[in-house]
Every structure is written in structure tokens, then in C-alpha cells.
Amino acid sequence: MEISVIYNTNNQERIRITNHKEAYELIIKNWNLNIIEFQEECKVILMNKGNYVLGIYDVSKGGIDSSVVDIRIILAIALKCNATQLILVHNHPGGNLNPSSSDINITEKLKKACELLNLSLLDHLIITKHHYYSLNDENKFL
């Protein structure tokens, strides 16, 4: 099995993310709102050094209270896309925006792994249909 990436770029339409609110506004438009309160999903926003979005990758779909986050897959996709910056995003179907210990743990692991490859994990957002929580903004980013 090979990880492949298809490039469909139009530089005039490229979106630039400069803060977590813009990241939330982009990702919520790319989320299936019919199941956001039913099934946990994880996605990653891939960006270049200029904060321009290269793409959004669906990392996993899980159950009602968890999804698998494979750091190796995220890093492989980032390298294939020539991304230099990432924002990890997942939803909490129950509506609780507070990060679990697992959320904080995976954030720390991904941040360390990114640093080894000269990538930057800019944030980890936990989202619901109408709100979001930024681990970076709330000083949960170690």
C-alpha cells in the first residue's frame, strides 16, 4: 500500500490560516455536520510555511468517544504534501470541549514527532458543531 497525494492547486483560491478561529471556520465547512454529534473523527490541516492550506486529510473515524490517531500516517501525509505546518482537529460527539488526558497525550507525542522532522504542530482543536477549544490557546500545548 502506498500513500498518495493528488495536487489540485489554484494559488488564487488558496486559503491562509493565521489563527485558530480561521482554522475552525475552515474545518467546520469540511466536516459532515450530520454525524459530528454521533461519531468521533480526526482530521489534519496541512499548510506551508506561509500558512497557506495545502489540504485537509481525514486521519480516522471512530466511535462515539474515540478515534485512532496514527502519528506515522499523519507525518507520512505531511511529508508527501511538502507541508511544514499542521493543525490537528477532532470532534467530541458528546459536546464536551475539554481535552481528555488522551487528547493531551497525543498532542504531546505528535508535537515531538513533528519537531524531529522539522515540522510545526501549530495547534490541536477540539470541535463541536458550534464551538471549538484550542489546546494551544489554553496553554495545554507542552
Image: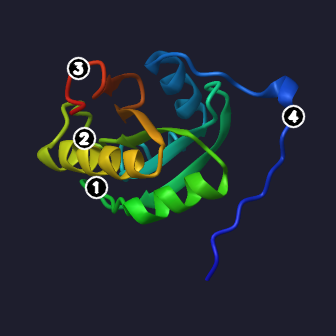
**Amino acid type indicated by mark 4:** Asn
Helix or strand or loop: what does disc 2 sit on?
loop
SS label for mark 3: loop
Q: Answer with left or right where residue 104 lies relative to residue 35.
A: left
Res. 31 in view:
no
Q: Specify the amino acid type for callout 3.
A: Glu
The answer to whether marks 1 and 2 mark residues whose Cβ atoms lie closer than 8 Å is yes
Amino acid type at circle 1 is: Ile
Q: Quadrant of the C terminus?
A: top left
The extreme left residue here reads 101
| Residue 138, numbered circle | 3
The quadrant in which the N terminus is found is bottom right
* Residue 5 position in % (x across, y down): 71, 60
Disc 1 crowd rating (10 Å Cα; few below 14, some 14-19, many 20+) is some
- SS of the residue under disc 4: loop
Q: Residues within 10 Å of mark 4 (few under 14, many from 20)?
A: few
Specify whether 123 is left or right of 108: right
Query: Distance of mark 3 from mark 2, alpha carbons?
Result: 20 Å
Q: CA distance from mark 1 to mark 3?
A: 25 Å
